Image (tube, rainbow, N blue to C red):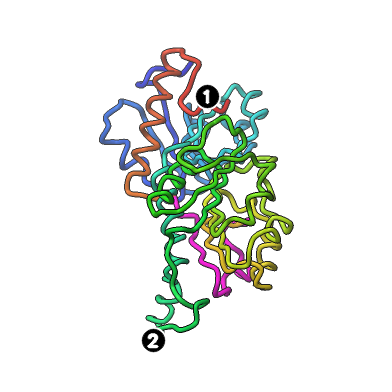
Amino acid sequence: MLPPSDQLTVCFAHVAYRFGDRFAPRNTGIRFIEARSREELDATIAQADVLVCSGMWRNDLPKIAPKLRFVQSCSAGTDQYDRDVLKAAGIRLASGQGINANAVSEHAIALMLALLRRIPEARDNQAKRVWRGMQGDFAKREDEAGGKTAVVVGLGRIGGRIARLCKAFGMKVIGVRQNVAGGAEGADEVHSFRDLATVLPRADFLILACPLTDETRGLVNAAALAAMKPTAQIINVARGRVIDEPALIATLQAGGIVGAALDVTADEPLPADSPLWAMPNVLVTPHTGGETHMYEDNVLDFMVENVGRLQRGETALVNQIV
């Protein structure tokens, strides 16, 4: 149970997001502090009853946070949090699942359209002041989404919306999810993870929107990539390690698939020596799929609701993990 609002301290820990600016006008009576670096977080975490964070989390933080009782993750993914550590320290955890569902699903579609319409190539030509003429080579021509098949892996809030948006473009959608009984979410058909290899040969686009788990780590490996047709492309708005990145690079270099658009990579920031930077058939965005003007407010809505529940002694949280 959390203390009343006038005795509560929330720590917002993020290098960029301006939670304090959006929280102050709410006039909740709750004191807040902000940390913009891990050093600042280490110096302030002992004051916090509630922590809002994502990338700054470390599993040794509970050792220096005696008051901490609740962590509101500001990301949908929570693989960075050790559940056993949190349970041992008596700290509750809730995810940000759904906070950025609109933004990430729209980003996935933007990446798909950018590949179809060869937008990166057009931008490169603009920088070089090149006006490309009409293209006779089918392989170098822009394309359209209608009639193509998208295999969407993960049919949660993000993947389900991706499926529905793909349908709006006249695409056939094959959904892949852990629990088939969870529903098709607008997809034409749905399969389990174990059936992925059987549907990959049908994919014009493989769109990854699943969480990183033991089951999905390395899900798209060399064998999966080899099952795809050479005209296929990959969109990843899930987690970088869902893909075997060296296998992806080798497949792209060999022409095994046409291209990829990645908002996430195995290591972030993407190392300067990664071949992905310079590959003309790869579009990289820096894990910004979830960013939106509404991001801070969306996170704060979840946090305020969960804090209220804990203050009232309720046990169930929105997006409860621990």
Where in the figure is residue 122, as x and y percent of width and height? 40, 76
Q: Amino acid at mark 1?
A: Arg
Relative to 11, say whether 92 is above or below.
above
For label 1, the SS is: loop
Which residue is identified by label 1?
69
Where in the figure is residue 66, as x and y percent of width and height? 57, 26
Relative to 61, say whether 174 is above or below.
below
Determine if the magenta segment contains residue 268.
yes
How crowded pointer 1 is (Cα within 10 Å; few <14, some 14-19, many 20+) is rated as: many
How crowded pointer 2 is (Cα within 10 Å; few <14, some 14-19, many 20+) is rated as: few
Q: Earlier in the sequence, mark 2 or mark 1?
A: 1
Q: Residue at x 44, y 69 (%)?
A: 143
Locate residue 159 relative to residue 303 in the image: left or right: right
Where in the figure is residue 6, as x and y percent of width and height? 35, 21
Where in the figure is residue 128, as x and y percent of width and height? 41, 85
CA gap between label 2 and label 1 equals 62 Å
Residue extent of the magenta highlight: 266-289
Point out the residue furthest to the right here: 223
Q: Is 43 or 114 nearer to us in this picture?
A: 114
Question: Which mark identifies residue 59?
Answer: none
Relative to 32, say whether 173 is above or below.
below
Q: Residue at x 63, y 71 (%)?
A: 275
Locate residue 279 relative to residue 307 in the image: left or right: right
Q: Quadrant of the C terminus?
A: top right
Q: Is residue 130 visible?
A: yes
- Indicate which label's residue lies in the foreground, 2 or 1: 2
Q: Residue at x 43, y 55 (%)?
A: 109
Q: Is residue 273 visible?
A: no
Q: Residue at x 61, y 65 (%)?
A: 271
Q: Amino acid at mark 2?
A: Gly
Question: Which mark identifies residue 133?
Answer: 2
